[in-house]
Amino acid sequence: MSRGSEAAVIRIKPHHYVHVLDNNSNVTRVEVGPQTFTRKDHETVVSGPDSMIMIPPRHYAIISNPVVKDEKGHVQQEKSGQIKLRHGDEEIRFQQDPFPLYPGEKLYGKVSPLQVVAPNTALRLRVIRTFVAGEGEPERNAGDEYLFEGPGTYIPRVEVQVVEIVKAIIVKPNQALRLRAKKAFLDKRGINRKAGEEWLVSESGGYLPDVNEEVVQTIEAYILTDKKALHLEATNTFTDIFGKERKAGEEWLVTIADAETHIPDVYEKVIGEVKITTLTNRQYCVVIDPIGKDGKPQMGKRELRKGEISFFLRPGEKLESGIQNVHVLDSEEAILLRAREAFVDGDQKRKPGDRWMIYGPDDYVPPVAVEIVQKRRAIPLDENEGIYVRDITTGRVRMVTGRAYMLEPNEVLWEKNLPAVVEELLAKQHTSRDRAEQPKGVETRRDKTKVVTFRTPHNSAVQIYDYKAKVARVVFGPELVMLGPDEQFTVLSLSGEIPKRPDVIKSLTL
């Protein structure tokens, strides 16, 4: 209470007011200036003179315990004359003429400017009291939250509480926001979303997430080139961005023919990036389980692809033996082939298991129905050289000498085994010159497919027995002995040492 409250005469300036208490009725009233107020004996000035509340443009003030007004804006009084108040309530007042505070009213805080919401920002508001903003507006229930998006000036209400300022998330080109619904609601696109549902927002620019939306992550787009594709798998049945229905578990590729960039959908799982497979005009490959024209894998099938070509291996496809070079044959080479299945080879019908050969000079790419058994080369043989050849059809073994020989499709090299003592005696026949030319530590083993030869020394003889014909022959030296497929040397056991002991000396010659 100021010193002027005890004075009998109080001069109230313009835009000022005092509260006067009538001690007889215990009612407090307001006296507004400009005036000269004469206080009576039963009256007491309880407060003032105080300045009126002035709210400039674009400002507001919060009044606690506001007065009750009728429809015409007149202040309501009780029967005793006391001003009616809404105790415990608040009222927000905006730009108006200066006004006094009635007894019981209080200014909450101070006069504050209205909050300006900038572009790409919003105020997150929470309703603390159910209300309807106006005709045509939805009813806001206590606990509801909504956004006031800028740019604009926010007009506060006592029923609404400002929770926080939300800033827009900038979505750059080749980016997308992955959102999740906190509860069932209608999004900005007019789509009904269920609680827990996820979706993408890929439009470039600022995006303000709704109060019912949760930003899971920012997804970067994959850049697709002529040499790189994207391998995807569907985690749920859905329709992709290209309008094609994908089943759960289905796998597919997205290439540059589909799009230059791709942002994986919420139901798309990125398995990895697939590099292009390129074949030159001298290369080929066999693709196992190729994808058919209907987009489904053809399990168990094999597909031949020849260069020049570039392609992506689709999910489920794989290369058999990788990328292979075209088989180039010179005039002394050939390829032994075997049919995997029945097919027509030119004018001939091949059955499974058939064997045949392709002779050079030529280049060859085997069809999927053909298996390459072996690449063969003509074996050059001198007059004193030979090989053992076995016919796999009849089982007959023969010896070929003195000419270059190419094995037939039904022939293989045959290995002739000799007793260990004969192998040892043949190995000792190498001259000191042969041993000198041989690197140290390297053991020379006899090629069992070559004809066994033995140089019979001068004034000596070798006995050879043919176990098939059951005939023995003796070769006198000097002579080169060449064993046939069914022939064996007769090993001589001689006595030796002093005193003599039997079977000391083992020899092929006598």
Image (cartoon, rainbow, N blue to C red):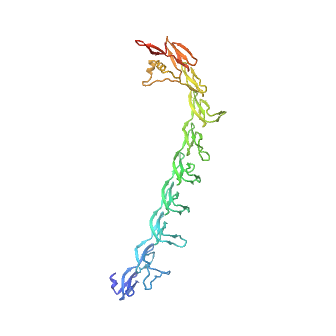
Q: Which x, y percent locates residue 473?
A: 55, 14
Residue 56 lies in quadrant: bottom left
Residue 33 seen in the current view: no
Count of marks, rendered view: 0
Which residue is at a point 52% across and 73% down the rendered structure image? 134
The x, y position of residue 144, in whole percent, is 49, 67
Q: Residue furthest top?
A: 459
457 lies left or right of 302: left
Return the residue nearer the eye: 293 or 421.
Answer: 421
Q: Tell whether 235 sits left or right of 112.
A: right
Quadrant in the picture for the N terminus: bottom left
Farthest residue in the bottom direction? 41
372 w.r.t. 468: above or below: below
* Residue 115 on image: x %, y %: 45, 69
Give the image location of residue 170, x and y in percent. 48, 58
Q: Residue furthest left?
A: 3
Q: Answer left or right for 273 relative to 45.
A: right
Can you say whether 8 is above or below 416 in the image? below
Q: Residue at x 54, y 50 (%)?
A: 233
Camera sees residue 168: yes
Image height of 429 relative to 232, above or below: above
